[in-house]
Amino acid sequence: MPNYRRAFVPGGCWFFTVNLLERKRTLLVDRIDDFRDAVRKTRERHPFSIDAMVVLPDHVHAVWTLPPGDAHFSVRWRWIKHRFAQAMPADERRSQVRLARGERGIWQRRFWEHLIRDEADYARHVEYCYINPMKHGLVTRVVDWPYSSFHRDVGAGIFPSDWAGDADAPGEFGERRAQ
């Protein structure tokens, strides 16, 4: 088993990818109000800033900043996943292992996180969040995807509404290069 280590930086900023267990499901957009409610209730109990977030049918990308002195992003994701799962009927397929552990079969157990290193890294990951619906072929313009903090940032004047247009969006957006 790999020795997995997470970076814990109090008050840090991270990029996350969190996936549904069954990647062909569309639960996150089908039940967007339940997901939003899970995030809202988690933020009430464990505050954090959402710098960027996009909810796709089967996964979420987010950039968060935690309060000074706090590095417990895993607690926040555990609460969001738990609250969202509580809102779902228990009709999903579950493995024997999940049944034995009393676990739901909605989310992948782990998530991917990346500690943001500098302003360029921050910009690249925020842009990755916003371009992701286009990357997956869900829309041809970023502004057309409704489940994104992009709309908040347009309203604040951070991005123009036609950002990324309907082009192929070349560039690197936080993805690893093929070796």
Image (tube, rainbow, N blue to C red):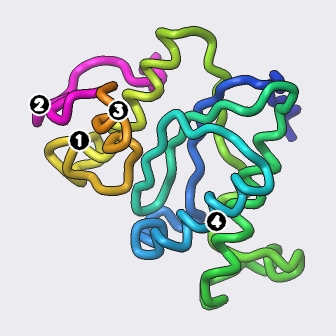
The stretch of residues the image draws in magenta is 159-179
Mark linked to residue 142: 1
Among numbered discs 2 and 3, the one appearing first in the sequence: 3
Q: Tell whether 1 sits left or right of 83.
A: right
Residue denoted by label 3 = 156
Kindly report the distance in space between the C-alpha atoms of the residues bearing marks 2 and 4: 34 Å
Q: Quadrant of residue 109?
A: bottom right
Q: Position of residue 117 (x, y in %)?
A: 63, 12
**Viewer-nearest of discs 1 and 2:** 1
- The residue closer to the viewer here, 63 or 42, is 42
**Real-space CA distance between mark 2 and mark 3, rounded to the nearest whole angstrom:** 23 Å
Identify whether 170 is placed above or below 73.
Answer: above
Amino acid at pointer 4: Ala
**Numbered disc in front, either 2 or 4:** 4
Q: CA distance from mark 1 to mark 3?
A: 16 Å
Depth-wise, is mark 3 or mark 4 nearer the camera?
A: 3
- Residue 76 position within the rendered picture, expressed as x and y whole percent measured from the top left: 75, 50
Tell me the residue that label 2 is attached to. 167
Which x, y percent locates residue 23? 48, 62
Query: What residue is shown at x 58% (from left), y 32% (from top)?
Result: 15
- Describe the element under mark 2 as helix, strand or loop: loop
- Looking at the image, tell me whether mark 2 or mark 4 is earlier in sequence order: 4
Relative to 128, 14 lies left or right: right
Residue depicted at x 82% and y 50%: 75
Q: Name the residue that disc number 4 marks.
A: 38
- CA gap between label 1 and label 4 equals 25 Å
Mark 1: which secondary structure?
helix
Secondary structure at badge 4 equals helix
